[in-house]
Structures are given as C-alpha cells and as structure tokens.
Amino acid sequence: MTKKTLAFASGSEHKRKEMQMLLSPFGYEVVTPKTLGIKFQPEETETTFLGNSFIKSKELFRLTGLPSFADDSGISVDALGGEPGVSSARFGGPGLSDKERALYLLTKLGNNSNRNAHYSCVVTYVDAHHNLSFEGTVNGQITTDYDEVGPYGFGYDPIFYYSEFGKRFSQVPEEEKNKVSHRKKAMELFLKWFHMIQ
Ligand code: IMP
C-alpha cells in the first residue's frame, strides 16, 4: 500500500510525532513544513483559536496541495475576560520564558477569588473538498502560586489545577494528561470524522 500524506502546520517535531502516532493506523505519513523543507511563517492575525488555526491549515494547503491540518491552542482565564487566549504564547511580551509568562498571569490575577480557567484547542482540516474544525476544552483553576517541583507539562501547566485529578497538570504524566486534554479531545473529534471519510 502506498502511504498517503497529510500535512501538519506546526514547527514542533514533538507534536509531529504525536500526530504521526495517531494517524499511523489510517496509513498516513504526517509531514510538516520543516520535513518538507518549505518556509512557513503565516501571521496569526485572527482573534480566535478557530481563525488562527484556519490561517495555518489553509496556508499549508495552498502551499503544498496536500490535505492539511493545524491546531491552535491556549488558556483563557474568566476573571481576565478570557485573556490570554490567542495571545497565550506571547502573553506579557516577547522574550519571556514559559515560567515568566505563568508568573505574569498570576500577578495579573492577583488575589481574585474567581480562579476559573480553561484550555482550548481548535483543530482545522482543509483539502480540496473540506473546510472543517474540531474543538476540545478542559476546565480548571488557576492556582495562587507556581509549582516548582512538578516535572511534567509545559506552558501554564504549573499553575493549572485540574480538580478531577486533584493535581496540577505539571504533576500529571503525559499519558494521563493526554486522556483529558483539550488537544486530545479536539484530535479525537477530528480522527472520528477522518475515519468516516476514508
Ligand atoms: P500552540 O497552539 O501550541 O502554539 O500553543 C499556544 C500556547 O498556549 C502555548 O505556548 C502555551 O503557552 C499555551 N498552551 C497550549 N496548550 C497548553 C498546555 O497543554 N499546557 C500548557 N500551556 C498550553
């Protein structure tokens, strides 16, 4: 059987491998702009995860002609009116580390008693016949301090408490987090649909 190819609009090799594992059962090889050797830096100018995810998947489809998918994700904090949202990766300004961004969020939230927050992920898929989106979310609370010891996760995980596990995401191994994460939920919906059109 010849391998079919699916293009994934991400610069992260870690994410490509994760997607490859999910799509191998369908007989697909997952390629990225990097593995294809093409320059890919679309500006994410939209104000929603959906809009920015489509900017990436549509641009990759335009460039490669391959069925293309993208994800866009971030954390939204209720008491901050949904901030940082689509700005999660650059919250607090350029040049900050993940830890500095999380500490910035803690400072902004101060001692506000409403700590509700959620991670969102929107996966979009584009080919010659389809333009589709799939969303996953996971609810939690922003803690009052930064977890210095939890060895897992990235980004805002050291300040994201998930009550169902009674732990922060920084204290949950990747396999456990992947059972409930926003990215996993969005990918599950995408794969369910993708399975149907094969
Ligand atoms: P991207 O969609 O992979 O570019 O992620 C956007 C940003 O959202 C990341 O840089 C993180 O700051 C944040 N983010 C998204 N998903 C997670 C997560 O699962 N844990 C922690 N931070 C996340």
Image (cartoon, grey):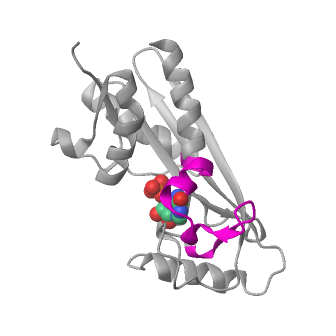
Q: Position of residue 20 (x, y in %)?
A: 34, 37
Magenta part of the chain: 158-183
Left or right position of 183 against 32 = right
Q: Residue at x 27, y 41 (%)?
A: 32
In the rendered image, the vertical position of residue 14 relative to residue 161, given as above or below: above
Residue 169: in magenta span: yes
In the rendered image, the vertical position of residue 110 relative to residue 88, given as above or below: below
Q: Residue at x 78, y 71 (%)?
A: 79
Q: Residue at x 42, y 35 (%)?
A: 22
Left or right position of 147 against 153 = right
Residue occupying the far right of the picture: 113
Q: Position of residue 57 (x, y in %)?
A: 41, 36
**Which quadrant holds residue 136?**
top right
Q: Position of residue 28 (x, y in %)?
A: 32, 25
Quarter of the figure that contains the C terminus: top left
Numbered label tally: 0
**Which quadrant holds residue 85?**
bottom right
Frontmost residue, 118 versus 151: 151
Q: Position of residue 111 (x, y in %)?
A: 78, 87
Q: Residue at x 21, y 46 (%)?
A: 34
**Which quadrant holds residue 176?**
bottom right
Q: Say if residue 171 shows up in the picture.
A: yes
Left or right position of 178 against 68 = right
Residue 181: in magenta span: yes
Quarter of the figure that contains the N terminus: top left
